[in-house]
Image: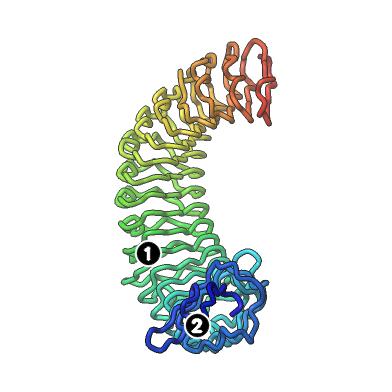
């Protein structure tokens, strides 16, 4: 083949890069030329299609001029592994269904490569004869039809990835009954209807159903997924109360329930998920208080409960053990009371957003001890009192607008925050002269309007300023 660079006059193809041969017969049995900068069309008369003993072929991420997929691939009947990801465009030929020994098939498409299956032909072309399939990846392939019932016959299937395939209709009832299925990704399709029941002995550890149009509740049988590590159902139109059984899945490390219509209270048993690192139930209708059991999630790095109907105070016990937490969002709820000083325990915190709540009292000076903090977003609350003497040196974004803060800006709180680029103190009751140290910062956004500052402004040193608004008398 012209794609190989034969160095030193080596004519034995078994010594070429990416080629493996059977030691006994000398036949070529495997070719891996993935990401090898190959270019030009792969034609039907290529010598590749004469390698009748070939078992593994990987041509992923090369440039064959977006040519169509040759039907001659169907001649390689001994293939058990075929990866043509991001290689071809056009229709997937029916002849590929002759590869009955395939265990792994990857025809995923990205960028300018768009494969498609004729409407309603997915089962006939891909799966009808491939009963040995263990892994199937068709991400980005245009299918434009429901998932065929015949998928339920692929009893050896462990991995199924059909991201962005324009799939529609309801999932077949047997899809989650496959005995060996471990990984299923159906992200960003047009799937609808109720979610089928899960196998009582399911091995699924990765489940992504995000960005679809399902309706109804998550089935109680989701509690059968004892091995589940990753769950993503964001933006999928689910509603109702999250099944209690979900909070007993002790292997979960990431859960994204955001942008659905879930309601009810967050269950205390959420504290059972000891391995949880990310949980995101934002943009739902959860109500009630924050369960103190969240404080048991000592591995948690991201917690996003924004845009719900949560109320009450933040339990002090919630913060004591979350020493790994980096990202905390509680904004757009009805949380009240003072911000606990125990926030100082969150030593790894990078992003803190408590916007649009009913928090009151002063900004805890203990926040100045959070040496990793980059964003402090406390706008639209009932905060009062004066600014803390100091902010963390790491801070980049401070938003305190629409509160009841008073007093002057301490020069010590501003002088050392040299990384600060976004500062909004508008709509408070600040007074006094703005410290000159503020104008030494590299701010790109500054709002001071709707306060009672006095004195003059010297913004000429703010070379990076993109937005400045000062409307009231200062």
Q: Please name whichever residue, 417 or 8, is drawn nearer the observer in this view of the structure.
A: 8
Q: Is residue 419 above or below residue 228?
A: above
Q: What residue is rendered at 60% in x and 14% in y?
A: 436
Q: What residue is rendered at 33% in x and 59% in y?
A: 245
Q: Is residue 19 visible?
A: yes
Q: Label 1: which residue? A: 205
Residue 230 appears in which quarter of the rendering? Answer: bottom left
Quadrant, the C terminus: top right
**Residue 215 percent across, percent down from the top left:** 51, 63
Q: Is residue 350 left or right of residue 63?
A: left
Q: Residues within 10 Å of mark 1 (few under 14, many from 20)?
A: some
Q: Please name whichever residue, 442 or 22, is drawn nearer the observer in this view of the structure.
A: 22
Q: Is residue 474 above or below residue 144?
A: above
3D distance between C-alphas at marks 1 and 2: 23 Å
**Residue 459 percent across, percent down from the top left:** 67, 20
**Residue 49 percent across, percent down from the top left:** 56, 86
Q: What residue is rendered at 35% in x and 51% in y?
A: 276
Q: What residue is rendered at 67% in x and 26% in y?
A: 463
Quadrant, the N terminus: bottom right
Is label 2 in a helix, a strand or a loop?
helix
**Residue 109 percent across, percent down from the top left:** 59, 69
Is label 1 in a helix, a strand or a loop?
loop
Residue 36 appears in which quarter of the rendering? Answer: bottom right
Q: Is residue 166 visible?
A: no
Q: Label 2: which residue? A: 127
Q: Give the mark count.
A: 2
């Amino acid at each position: 083949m012209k794609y190989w660079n034969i160095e030193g006059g080596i004519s034995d193809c078994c010594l070429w890069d990416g080629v493996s041969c059977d030691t006994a017969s000398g036949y070529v049995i495997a070719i891996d030329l993935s990401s090898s900068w190959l270019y030009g069309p792969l034609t039907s008369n290529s010598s590749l299609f004469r390698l009748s003993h070939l078992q593994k072929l990987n041509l992923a991420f090369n440039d064959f001029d977006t040519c169509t997929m040759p039907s001659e691939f169907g001649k390689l009947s001994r293939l058990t592994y075929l990866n043509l990801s991001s290689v071809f465009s056009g229709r997937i030929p029916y002849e590929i269904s002759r590869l009955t020994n395939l265990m792994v098939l990857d025809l995923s498409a990205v960028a300018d490569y768009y494969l498609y299956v004729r409407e309603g032909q997915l089962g006939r072309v891909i799966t009808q004869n491939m009963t040995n399939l263990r892994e199937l990846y068709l991400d980005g392939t245009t299918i434009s039809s429901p998932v065929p019932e015949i998928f339920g016959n692929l009893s050896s299937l462990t991995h199924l990835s059909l991201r962005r395939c324009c799939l529609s209709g309801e999932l077949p009832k047997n899809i989650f009954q496959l005995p060996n299925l471990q990984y299923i990704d159906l992200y960003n399709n047009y799937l609808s209807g109720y979610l089928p029941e899960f196998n009582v002995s399911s091995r699924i550890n990765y489940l992504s159903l995000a960005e679809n149009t399902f309706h109804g509740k998550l089935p109680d049988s989701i509690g059968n997924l004892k091995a589940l590590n990753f769950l993503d159902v964001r933006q999928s139109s689910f509603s109702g109360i999250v099944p209690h059984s979900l909070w007993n899945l002790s292997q979960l490390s990431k859960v994204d329930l955001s942008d659905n219509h879930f309601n009810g209270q967050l269950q205390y048993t959420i504290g059972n998920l000891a391995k949880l690192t990310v949980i995101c139930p934002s943009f739902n209708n959860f109500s009630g208080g924050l369960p103190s059991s969240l404080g048991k999630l000592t591995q948690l790095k991201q917690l996003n409960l924004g845009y719900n109907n949560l109320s009450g105070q933040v339990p002090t016990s919630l913060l004591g053990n979350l020493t790994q937490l980096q990202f905390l969002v509680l904004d757009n709820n009805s949380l009240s009371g003072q911000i606990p000083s125990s926030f100082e325990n969150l030593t790894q915190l990078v992003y803190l957003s408590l916007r649009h709540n009913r928090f009151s009292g002063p900004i805890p000076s203990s926040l100045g001890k959070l040496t990793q903090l980059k964003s402090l977003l406390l706008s639209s609350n009932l905060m009062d009192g004066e600014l803390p003497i100091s902010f963390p040196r790491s801070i980049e974004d401070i938003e305190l607008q629409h509160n009841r803060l008073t007093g002057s800006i301490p020069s010590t709180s501003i002088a050392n925050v040299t990384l600060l680029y976004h500062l909004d103190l508008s709509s408070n009751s600040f007074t006094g002269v703005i410290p000159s140290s503020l104008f030494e910062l590299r701010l790109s956004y500054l709002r001071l309007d709707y306060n009672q500052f006095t004195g003059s402004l010297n913004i000429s040193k703010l070379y990076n300023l993109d937005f400045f608004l000062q409307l009231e008398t200062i």
